[in-house]
Amino acid sequence: MITLEIAQASKPLSEYAKELRDEIIVLMSGSEPVAVIVSLKNVDSLDLELLSLSANPEFMEMIEKARKEFRNGKKLSLEEMEREFQTVD
């Protein structure tokens, strides 16, 4: 991982993106990360979908809510889940 102070970036961001290999560049504003440049050269459509979801605040709220419920013991066994979501033919 490479960190780059955005105010000190001396090249256009497209140039930094072209130079990427396996690393990511985290753009910083002082001590705060504000953006990431990551290569998508070997990324398929599913990975792009996951990347998009991970940047969606509503989706991340749903994930955090589910994690909190799980930590608090609210979970279903496989059998319970199958009964809960059983479809009627």
Image (tube, rainbow, N blue to C red):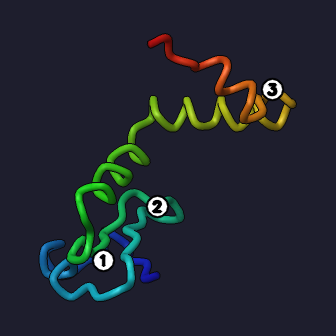
> In the structure shown, which secondary structural element does the residue marked by tag 2 occupy?
strand
> Compared with residue 65, is residue 5 higher up or lower down, i.e. above or below?
below
Q: Does 63 sit left or right of 16 as displayed?
A: right
Residue most extreme to the front = 89
Q: Position of residue 87 (x, y in %)?
A: 50, 16
Q: CA distance from mark 3 to mark 1?
A: 48 Å
> In the structure shown, which secondary structural element does the residue marked by tag 3 occupy?
loop
Q: Amino acid at mark 1?
A: Gln
Query: If the image is split into quadrants, where does the C terminus sit?
Result: top left
Q: Position of residue 4 (x, y in %)?
A: 38, 77
Q: What residue does disc 2 label? A: 33
State the residue at coordinates (38%, 77%): 24
Q: Amino acid at mark 3?
A: Lys
10 Å neighbourhood of mark 2: few (<14), some, or many (≥20)?
A: some
Q: Amino acid at mark 2?
A: Pro
Q: Nearer the viewer, residue 52 or 36?
A: 52
The reply to whether the C-beta atoms of the residues labelled 2 and 1 are less than 8 Å apart is no
Q: Earlier in the sequence, mark 3 or mark 1?
A: 1
> Compared with residue 70, is residue 17 higher up or lower down, i.e. above or below?
below
Q: Position of residue 33 (x, y in %)?
A: 46, 61
- Residue 89's label in the rendered image is none
Q: Earlier in the sequence, mark 2 or mark 3?
A: 2
Q: Earlier in the sequence, mark 2 or mark 1?
A: 1
State the residue at coordinates (36%, 60%): 35
Q: CA distance from mark 2 to mark 3?
A: 34 Å
Q: What residue does disc 3 label? A: 74
Q: Examine the image and state in which quarter residue 74 appears.
A: top right
